Amino acid sequence: MFGGVLDFRLLLDVLLAMGVGVLLFSRVNEPRTLWLLRGYIFLVSLAWFVQRLERLPLTSKLVDGLVLACSLSLAILWQGELRRLMELLGTGRLAVLLGNSQNEFSATASAIAQLTEAAGRLSQNRRGALVVIDTGSDLRPEDFLYSGIPLDAQLSTELLLNLFASDTPLHDGAVLIKGNKIISAGVILPLSRQGIARYGTRHLAALGITERFDRCICVVVSEETGTLSLANQGKLERPITSSRLGDLLSEIIGGSNTTQNSKNSSTANKTSSKALEETKSP
């Protein structure tokens, strides 16, 4: 019976380790990070295997020391990712951690078009703007330096233009968007430490929030030049045109809605074409 219990514990241990490994690999997109993670998991597996051999104490100590050194190196290298992991665990956002997609984070094609139009008009008028779009991080008030003024309003071009008007008290902060809703305005974001000499406050804020949460993006309009930018996963793409912005937004936050709309439009076009051919045929 003892051997059966031991085998069951071993099987459970292996299954849990495989589950954690699959979860980690599913959350990593960058190739170099994936290589480092594979190497680290290989070292941990080697250390586990060596520790089960009682006749190799010296080798076990060496492998344990190597794993410890690699753990410290990765903790320094991945401090941003580890901080994000602890924040998600501490706030109980397990759905975000597991990567479960929710319908509330996807936007319709109409909402994307209105956001793109607002950004283009703000760019033409050189009115500074910062829009945070939650694509699945489930951003909460404690994630910001100041959570802003709650709105919970339907997304529209006119409302965005009014919020970023120079004579309004909320124009210096960011607007938080989730799906088709404007959640809040006047939000103050944490600043990034990278590119301080090159970027202004709005761009540093966009980089800062996307560094901490990889499932949100920021649209930035420069007040000095009117340049459009898009921040995603701590990287800034600039300058971009309004049409390019629309394509990126459709790709990132459109999701199944955009695909379904395209399929419906295609089906409708085929149906109308078939009906027209039947009408013309004698």
Image: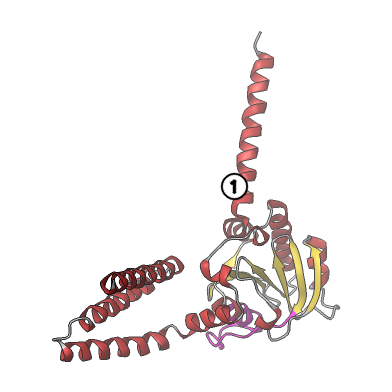
Disc 1 residue type?
Answer: Thr
Residue 125 versus residue 142 in the image, above or below: above
Report the residue at 68% width, 83% height from top: 142
Quick one: quadrant of the N terminus? Answer: bottom left
**Quadrant for the C terminus in the image:** top right
How far across and how far down the image is residue 229, in percent? 61, 70
Residue at x 23%, y 78% (from the top left corner) = 49
In the rendered image, residue 198 lying in the magenta stretch gets the answer yes
Query: Which is more toward the observer, 92 or 186?
Result: 92
Where residue 264 appears, as percent x and y from the top left, is 64, 39
Instruction: Count the marks.
Output: 1
Task: Report the span colored magenta.
Answer: 187-208
Q: Quadrant of residue 57?
A: bottom left
Q: Which residue is mark 1?
A: 259
**Residue 274 vertical position relative to residue 67 in the rendered view, above or below:** above
Residue 274 placement (x, y as % from top left):
63, 23
